[in-house]
Amino acid sequence: MSTFEVDGVEYQLIRNPYTNGPMITRADGGEVPNRKEICRRFLRQYGWTDEMFRNTITNELERAINKIVNDGKLKQPRLNSTLSKSGGYSREFSGFARKSPTSVNIPKPNRDEVLKWIEEWNKLEDYVAQEKAIERVFHNELKSNDDLTNILIKCSVLNDFYSTHIFKIYPLAKHILNLDIDGRLNAGDPNLVNDIAEVDFGDVEKNFYSFATKYCSHHRPDKYAIYDSYVDKMLVHFRNVDRFALFEAPELKVYSRFKEILDQFQAHYGLQEFDLKQLDRYLWRAGKHYFPKKYY
């Protein structure tokens, strides 16, 4: 395991179990509140300029540190896939807990179940109207992402309709503009979602992963699926019950992995006739029913 220091604090490089790349942690086990800033401070010692940091996500910075510290040869700890006694898949890494099957009784995914919950979604008049409005915004005169005004309007509409609670839209919109995303959107680049999600608000880095999946999906619903907490709960539930795929819940927040898991879900239950938008509406509406949020 390789180590380095920043401001007198010792950090270590380990393997990120979700991206398979290097990840920095504190050697003493303490919290790293802003990984990107630690990366910046280290790399500035090796000649990195502010321009070099522009549009560079944290994972890329960690790979740069790894190359400096180890000449690109990071020794990776072994990651074991196991099947718990209770029947749920687990991965042993950094104290991940084994998962037990949930006690919620949910019908197995099948054609009739999907159609039933899609029809339930269609009964939500406000959601149907909002989706029509979003489609008009994303697919007509505001379709491109090379104009800041276009992006501001689209971000504001999504933030309002989906209640994503982003308190300041401008830095997010500017971040998207700087990424120059239209080519990657059309190509269906899975890494684009996480690139959009990581936004630098000065001294604080925010991750708007669910919003980023929505932003990409509303541009290219044929290539990008939407992630939210209800979709997460449904996929984890059926992983526990039927073991349709081997994954830990945090892997769902790495978009390329999320899409792989969703594809496995679709194939396992024979749901290939449904597109990504239809699968999302099924998982979201059923998830909202079976895993209602409790407010106290």
Image (spheres, rainbow, N blue to C red):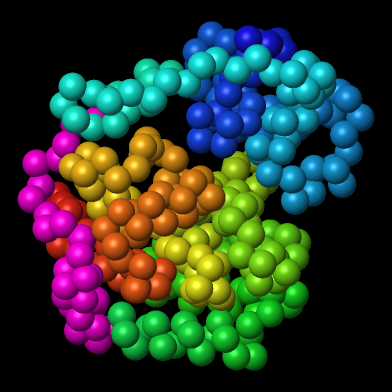
- Residue placed farthest to the right in the image? 47
Q: Nearer the viewer, residue 273 or 229?
A: 273
Rendered position, 33 above or below 49: above
Looking at the image, residue 247 lies above or below residue 30: below
- Residue at 66 percent of width and 38 percent of height: 58
State whether residue 184 appears in this view: yes
Image-based side of 144 in relation to 283, left or right: right
Residue 281 appears left or right of 276: left
Pick whichever, 167 or 236, lies toward us: 236
Residue 108 forms part of the magenta stretch: yes
Q: Residue at x 29, y 45 (%)?
A: 244
**Percent from the top left, x then y, of residue 237?**
22, 46
Q: Position of residue 63 (x, y in %)?
A: 72, 31
Q: Based on the displayed image, in which of its 4 quarters is residue 39 positioned?
A: top right
Residue 215 shows up from this direction: no
In the image, which residues are magenta?
Answer: 99-126
Q: Position of residue 101 (x, y in %)?
A: 16, 36
Image position of 230 with respect to 92: above or below: below
Q: At x 68% / y 44%, what residue is drawn?
A: 57
Kindly indicate the quadrant of the structure image that contains residue 26: top right
- Examine the rendered structure and indicate whether residue 77 appears above or below residue 183: above
